[in-house]
Image (cartoon, rainbow, N blue to C red):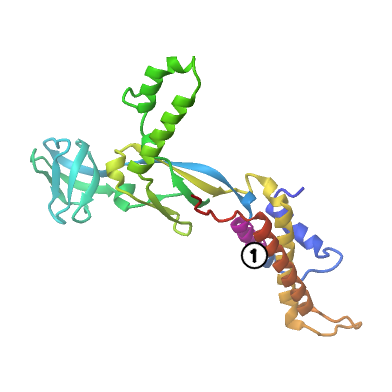
Amino acid sequence: MLASRTDLKNYALRKLGYPVIEINIEETQADDAIDDAFQFYQEYHFDAYERTYVTRQIKANEITVSGTVGTFLKDEWVISSITGSRFQVYDAIPTLIRTVSITNGNLQAAEVLTGEKSNATATVVSVALSDVQNGYIPLPENIHSVTKMLPWSQVNSSMNNMFNIQYQIRLNDLYALTNSDMVYFSQTMQHLALMEQILVSEPQLRFNRHTNRVYIDSNIKDKVSPDGWVVLECYGLLDPDTFTNVYNDRMLKRLCVAYTKRQWGANLSKFDKIVLPGGVMLRGGDIYKEAMIEINDIEESFQSMFEIGPNFLVG
Protein backbone atom coordinates (compact mmCIF):
# COMPACT_ATOMS: atom_id res chain seq x y z
CA MET A 1 0.00 0.00 0.00
CA LEU A 2 1.69 3.18 -1.19
CA ALA A 3 1.00 6.18 1.02
CA SER A 4 3.61 8.82 0.14
CA ARG A 5 5.62 10.31 -2.69
CA THR A 6 8.71 8.41 -1.54
CA ASP A 7 6.78 5.13 -1.62
CA LEU A 8 5.68 5.84 -5.19
CA LYS A 9 9.21 6.70 -6.32
CA ASN A 10 10.69 3.58 -4.74
CA TYR A 11 7.89 1.48 -6.26
CA ALA A 12 8.78 2.72 -9.76
CA LEU A 13 12.45 1.86 -9.24
CA ARG A 14 11.60 -1.64 -7.97
CA LYS A 15 9.37 -2.31 -10.95
CA LEU A 16 12.31 -1.47 -13.21
CA GLY A 17 14.59 -3.97 -11.46
CA TYR A 18 16.14 -2.16 -8.50
CA PRO A 19 18.01 -3.33 -6.39
CA VAL A 20 18.84 -6.37 -8.55
CA ILE A 21 20.12 -4.08 -11.27
CA GLU A 22 21.26 -0.48 -11.11
CA ILE A 23 18.82 2.10 -12.41
CA ASN A 24 20.91 4.91 -13.86
CA ILE A 25 18.73 7.84 -12.86
CA GLU A 26 19.48 10.73 -10.51
CA GLU A 27 17.26 11.61 -7.54
CA THR A 28 15.98 14.85 -9.03
CA GLN A 29 15.23 13.09 -12.34
CA ALA A 30 13.11 10.55 -10.46
CA ASP A 31 11.26 13.44 -8.80
CA ASP A 32 10.68 15.04 -12.20
CA ALA A 33 9.20 11.79 -13.51
CA ILE A 34 6.80 11.69 -10.55
CA ASP A 35 5.85 15.34 -11.15
CA ASP A 36 5.14 14.67 -14.84
CA ALA A 37 3.02 11.63 -13.98
CA PHE A 38 0.99 13.60 -11.43
CA GLN A 39 0.45 16.44 -13.89
CA PHE A 40 -0.96 14.09 -16.52
CA TYR A 41 -2.99 12.18 -13.92
CA GLN A 42 -4.57 15.38 -12.60
CA GLU A 43 -5.47 16.59 -16.08
CA TYR A 44 -7.12 13.41 -17.38
CA HIS A 45 -8.26 11.17 -14.50
CA PHE A 46 -11.66 11.89 -12.94
CA ASP A 47 -10.48 10.55 -9.57
CA ALA A 48 -7.88 13.31 -9.34
CA TYR A 49 -10.44 15.97 -8.42
CA GLU A 50 -13.83 16.36 -6.80
CA ARG A 51 -16.72 18.79 -6.93
CA THR A 52 -16.53 21.46 -4.28
CA TYR A 53 -17.98 24.88 -3.50
CA VAL A 54 -15.92 28.00 -2.93
CA THR A 55 -17.49 30.82 -0.94
CA ARG A 56 -16.21 34.36 -1.14
CA GLN A 57 -17.48 37.34 0.81
CA ILE A 58 -17.67 40.47 -1.31
CA LYS A 59 -15.92 43.22 0.59
CA ALA A 60 -16.07 46.94 -0.04
CA ASN A 61 -13.02 49.04 -0.86
CA GLU A 62 -11.48 50.04 2.45
CA ILE A 63 -9.78 53.44 2.62
CA THR A 64 -7.81 54.02 5.79
CA VAL A 65 -7.70 57.74 6.60
CA SER A 66 -6.28 60.06 9.23
CA GLY A 67 -6.87 63.64 10.34
CA THR A 68 -10.60 63.43 9.70
CA VAL A 69 -12.45 66.72 10.11
CA GLY A 70 -16.24 66.42 10.16
CA THR A 71 -18.34 63.35 9.36
CA PHE A 72 -18.70 61.74 5.95
CA LEU A 73 -22.34 61.00 5.14
CA LYS A 74 -23.62 57.69 3.81
CA ASP A 75 -24.15 57.71 0.01
CA GLU A 76 -22.49 61.10 -0.46
CA TRP A 77 -19.86 61.52 -3.17
CA VAL A 78 -16.25 62.12 -2.18
CA ILE A 79 -13.53 63.52 -4.43
CA SER A 80 -9.75 63.24 -4.03
CA SER A 81 -7.34 66.15 -4.38
CA ILE A 82 -4.61 64.68 -6.62
CA THR A 83 -5.97 61.98 -8.93
CA GLY A 84 -9.52 63.32 -9.02
CA SER A 85 -10.91 59.94 -8.02
CA ARG A 86 -14.55 59.90 -6.96
CA PHE A 87 -16.48 57.38 -4.91
CA GLN A 88 -19.76 57.08 -3.02
CA VAL A 89 -19.56 56.41 0.69
CA TYR A 90 -21.05 53.10 1.80
CA ASP A 91 -20.24 53.65 5.47
CA ALA A 92 -17.57 55.59 7.36
CA ILE A 93 -15.91 55.97 10.72
CA PRO A 94 -13.19 58.52 11.58
CA THR A 95 -10.36 56.16 10.56
CA LEU A 96 -11.97 54.11 7.77
CA ILE A 97 -14.21 54.79 4.77
CA ARG A 98 -15.79 51.96 2.79
CA THR A 99 -17.03 52.30 -0.77
CA VAL A 100 -18.29 49.89 -3.41
CA SER A 101 -16.33 51.30 -6.35
CA ILE A 102 -13.81 54.03 -7.12
CA THR A 103 -14.03 55.91 -10.43
CA ASN A 104 -11.77 58.24 -12.41
CA GLY A 105 -8.45 56.82 -11.31
CA ASN A 106 -6.80 55.14 -8.35
CA LEU A 107 -6.47 56.69 -4.95
CA GLN A 108 -3.00 57.40 -3.63
CA ALA A 109 -1.63 57.83 -0.15
CA ALA A 110 -1.46 61.41 1.16
CA GLU A 111 -4.42 62.56 -0.98
CA VAL A 112 -7.00 64.73 0.71
CA LEU A 113 -10.61 63.55 0.47
CA THR A 114 -13.52 65.99 0.56
CA GLY A 115 -17.21 65.16 0.94
CA GLU A 116 -19.42 67.03 -1.54
CA LYS A 117 -22.33 67.38 0.91
CA SER A 118 -20.76 67.29 4.36
CA ASN A 119 -17.52 69.12 3.38
CA ALA A 120 -15.75 66.66 5.68
CA THR A 121 -12.06 66.13 4.91
CA ALA A 122 -9.54 63.37 5.58
CA THR A 123 -6.10 62.27 4.38
CA VAL A 124 -5.62 58.88 2.72
CA VAL A 125 -3.23 56.54 4.52
CA SER A 126 -3.75 53.34 2.51
CA VAL A 127 -6.26 51.76 0.14
CA ALA A 128 -7.34 48.08 0.08
CA LEU A 129 -9.18 47.36 -3.16
CA SER A 130 -12.06 44.89 -3.20
CA ASP A 131 -12.83 42.08 -5.65
CA VAL A 132 -15.42 44.32 -7.31
CA GLN A 133 -12.82 47.01 -7.95
CA ASN A 134 -10.22 44.49 -9.18
CA GLY A 135 -12.77 42.88 -11.48
CA TYR A 136 -12.06 39.29 -10.48
CA ILE A 137 -12.28 36.85 -7.56
CA PRO A 138 -9.09 35.00 -6.57
CA LEU A 139 -9.41 31.25 -6.09
CA PRO A 140 -7.27 28.65 -4.30
CA GLU A 141 -4.49 27.02 -6.31
CA ASN A 142 -6.10 23.58 -6.21
CA ILE A 143 -9.14 24.69 -8.25
CA HIS A 144 -9.12 22.87 -11.58
CA SER A 145 -12.25 24.33 -13.18
CA VAL A 146 -15.31 26.48 -12.40
CA THR A 147 -18.65 25.18 -13.65
CA LYS A 148 -21.18 27.72 -12.43
CA MET A 149 -22.11 30.28 -9.81
CA LEU A 150 -25.12 29.86 -7.56
CA PRO A 151 -27.85 32.45 -8.24
CA TRP A 152 -27.54 35.69 -6.32
CA SER A 153 -31.07 35.34 -4.95
CA GLN A 154 -30.38 31.95 -3.38
CA VAL A 155 -27.11 32.92 -1.77
CA ASN A 156 -27.95 36.38 -0.45
CA SER A 157 -31.56 35.94 0.65
CA SER A 158 -33.13 34.27 3.64
CA MET A 159 -35.89 31.69 3.53
CA ASN A 160 -37.34 33.38 6.62
CA ASN A 161 -37.84 36.64 4.74
CA MET A 162 -41.61 37.27 4.46
CA PHE A 163 -41.12 38.74 0.96
CA ASN A 164 -39.50 35.54 -0.29
CA ILE A 165 -41.80 33.79 -2.79
CA GLN A 166 -41.10 30.33 -1.39
CA TYR A 167 -41.88 31.60 2.10
CA GLN A 168 -45.24 32.96 0.91
CA ILE A 169 -46.15 29.71 -0.87
CA ARG A 170 -45.39 27.67 2.20
CA LEU A 171 -47.19 30.10 4.47
CA ASN A 172 -50.41 30.29 2.46
CA ASP A 173 -50.66 26.96 0.64
CA LEU A 174 -48.77 24.38 2.67
CA TYR A 175 -51.83 23.50 4.80
CA ALA A 176 -53.70 22.53 1.64
CA LEU A 177 -50.85 20.42 0.30
CA THR A 178 -51.04 18.02 3.22
CA ASN A 179 -54.46 16.81 2.04
CA SER A 180 -53.68 16.65 -1.68
CA ASP A 181 -50.91 15.65 -4.06
CA MET A 182 -47.82 17.76 -4.77
CA VAL A 183 -48.62 18.42 -8.43
CA TYR A 184 -49.67 22.04 -7.86
CA PHE A 185 -46.63 22.87 -5.75
CA SER A 186 -44.26 21.16 -8.21
CA GLN A 187 -45.74 22.95 -11.22
CA THR A 188 -45.63 26.30 -9.45
CA MET A 189 -41.97 25.90 -8.50
CA GLN A 190 -41.05 24.84 -12.05
CA HIS A 191 -42.88 27.89 -13.41
CA LEU A 192 -41.02 30.18 -11.01
CA ALA A 193 -37.71 28.58 -11.96
CA LEU A 194 -38.47 29.13 -15.64
CA MET A 195 -39.36 32.78 -15.02
CA GLU A 196 -36.13 33.31 -13.10
CA GLN A 197 -34.14 31.63 -15.87
CA ILE A 198 -35.69 33.94 -18.49
CA LEU A 199 -35.75 37.19 -16.55
CA VAL A 200 -32.64 36.74 -14.41
CA SER A 201 -29.98 35.17 -16.59
CA GLU A 202 -27.06 33.32 -15.07
CA PRO A 203 -23.86 35.37 -15.00
CA GLN A 204 -21.16 34.30 -17.44
CA LEU A 205 -17.87 33.20 -15.92
CA ARG A 206 -14.33 33.27 -17.26
CA PHE A 207 -11.67 31.21 -15.50
CA ASN A 208 -8.12 30.14 -16.26
CA ARG A 209 -6.36 27.93 -13.74
CA HIS A 210 -2.96 29.44 -14.56
CA THR A 211 -4.13 32.78 -13.13
CA ASN A 212 -6.37 31.37 -10.36
CA ARG A 213 -8.86 34.14 -11.08
CA VAL A 214 -12.51 33.94 -12.05
CA TYR A 215 -14.06 36.88 -13.85
CA ILE A 216 -17.81 37.40 -13.50
CA ASP A 217 -19.25 39.14 -16.55
CA SER A 218 -21.92 40.93 -14.58
CA ASN A 219 -22.22 44.09 -12.55
CA ILE A 220 -21.58 42.58 -9.14
CA LYS A 221 -22.07 45.83 -7.24
CA ASP A 222 -25.68 45.98 -8.43
CA LYS A 223 -26.32 42.35 -7.45
CA VAL A 224 -24.56 41.93 -4.11
CA SER A 225 -24.11 44.54 -1.44
CA PRO A 226 -20.84 44.70 0.50
CA ASP A 227 -20.47 41.79 2.94
CA GLY A 228 -22.66 39.67 0.63
CA TRP A 229 -21.55 36.28 -0.62
CA VAL A 230 -20.66 34.62 -3.90
CA VAL A 231 -20.74 30.81 -4.11
CA LEU A 232 -18.96 29.07 -7.00
CA GLU A 233 -19.33 25.43 -7.96
CA CYS A 234 -15.86 24.16 -8.83
CA TYR A 235 -13.76 21.06 -9.30
CA GLY A 236 -10.74 20.99 -7.02
CA LEU A 237 -7.68 18.76 -7.18
CA LEU A 238 -7.27 16.30 -4.34
CA ASP A 239 -4.23 16.84 -2.16
CA PRO A 240 -2.34 13.49 -2.20
CA ASP A 241 -0.62 14.31 1.09
CA THR A 242 -4.07 14.56 2.72
CA PHE A 243 -5.76 11.74 0.81
CA THR A 244 -2.86 9.30 0.59
CA ASN A 245 -4.86 6.70 -1.36
CA VAL A 246 -4.04 8.76 -4.44
CA TYR A 247 -0.49 7.41 -4.35
CA ASN A 248 -1.84 3.88 -4.63
CA ASP A 249 -3.92 4.53 -7.75
CA ARG A 250 -3.29 1.77 -10.27
CA MET A 251 -3.03 3.98 -13.35
CA LEU A 252 -0.85 6.53 -11.58
CA LYS A 253 1.60 3.80 -10.57
CA ARG A 254 1.81 2.52 -14.14
CA LEU A 255 2.43 6.02 -15.44
CA CYS A 256 5.16 6.71 -12.88
CA VAL A 257 6.96 3.49 -13.83
CA ALA A 258 6.79 4.34 -17.54
CA TYR A 259 8.01 7.92 -17.04
CA THR A 260 10.89 6.74 -14.85
CA LYS A 261 11.80 4.13 -17.46
CA ARG A 262 11.79 6.80 -20.16
CA GLN A 263 14.25 8.92 -18.18
CA TRP A 264 16.44 5.88 -17.54
CA GLY A 265 16.48 5.08 -21.25
CA ALA A 266 17.22 8.71 -22.14
CA ASN A 267 20.25 8.66 -19.83
CA LEU A 268 21.63 5.39 -21.21
CA SER A 269 20.97 6.37 -24.82
CA LYS A 270 23.98 8.71 -24.62
CA PHE A 271 26.12 5.56 -24.49
CA ASP A 272 23.97 3.39 -26.71
CA LYS A 273 25.54 0.25 -28.22
CA ILE A 274 28.70 0.58 -26.14
CA VAL A 275 30.10 -2.83 -25.22
CA LEU A 276 31.22 -3.15 -21.62
CA PRO A 277 33.86 -5.54 -20.32
CA GLY A 278 32.42 -9.05 -20.36
CA GLY A 279 30.49 -8.46 -23.59
CA VAL A 280 27.53 -6.62 -22.05
CA MET A 281 26.09 -4.03 -24.44
CA LEU A 282 24.21 -0.93 -23.29
CA ARG A 283 20.82 -0.62 -24.98
CA GLY A 284 19.50 2.67 -23.69
CA GLY A 285 17.83 3.47 -26.97
CA ASP A 286 15.75 0.30 -26.84
CA ILE A 287 14.73 1.03 -23.25
CA TYR A 288 13.66 4.52 -24.30
CA LYS A 289 11.60 3.19 -27.22
CA GLU A 290 9.89 0.60 -24.99
CA ALA A 291 9.06 3.32 -22.45
CA MET A 292 7.54 5.57 -25.12
CA ILE A 293 5.31 2.74 -26.37
CA GLU A 294 4.15 2.04 -22.80
CA ILE A 295 3.51 5.74 -22.16
CA ASN A 296 1.42 6.10 -25.31
CA ASP A 297 -0.68 3.07 -24.36
CA ILE A 298 -1.21 4.31 -20.80
CA GLU A 299 -2.07 7.86 -21.86
CA GLU A 300 -4.58 6.57 -24.42
CA SER A 301 -6.16 4.47 -21.68
CA PHE A 302 -6.43 7.56 -19.50
CA GLN A 303 -8.17 9.57 -22.19
CA SER A 304 -10.51 6.80 -23.32
CA MET A 305 -11.46 5.28 -19.95
CA PHE A 306 -10.91 7.81 -17.17
CA GLU A 307 -11.35 11.29 -18.65
CA ILE A 308 -14.61 13.14 -18.08
CA GLY A 309 -16.24 13.79 -21.43
CA PRO A 310 -17.09 17.26 -22.75
CA ASN A 311 -20.38 18.86 -21.81
CA PHE A 312 -22.70 18.96 -24.82
CA LEU A 313 -25.68 21.29 -25.07
CA VAL A 314 -28.80 19.15 -25.19
CA GLY A 315 -32.15 20.72 -25.93
Viewer-proximal residue among 304 and 292: 304
Viewer-proximal residue among 22 and 222: 222
What residue lies at 75% left-to-right and 67% top-to-bottom?
294
Q: Where is residue 118 in the image (x, y as percent from the top left)?
A: 9, 38
What residue lies at 51% left-to-right and 51% top-to-bottom?
314
Q: Does the magenta stretch include residue 71?
A: no
Q: Name the residue under label 1.
A: 32
Q: Position of residue 99 (x, y in %)?
A: 23, 42
Left-right relation of 303 to 286: left
What residue lies at 41% left-to-right and 50% top-to-bottom?
138
Q: Magenta stretch mostly in which secondary structure?
A: helix
Q: How many marks?
A: 1
Amino acid, disc 1: Asp
Q: Where is residue 19 in the image (x, y as percent from the top left)?
A: 84, 63
One can see residue 141 in this view: no
One can see residue 32 in this view: yes
Left-right relation of 307 to 165: right
Q: Where is residue 290 in the image (x, y as percent from the top left)?
A: 77, 73
* Secondary element at image label 1: helix
88 in relation to 286, above or below: above
Left-right relation of 12 to 52: right
What residue lies at 72% left-to-right and 82% top-to-bottom?
270
172 in relation to 72, above or below: above
Start-end of magenta stretch: 31-44
Viewer-proximal residue among 315 and 85: 315
276 in relation to 251, above or below: below
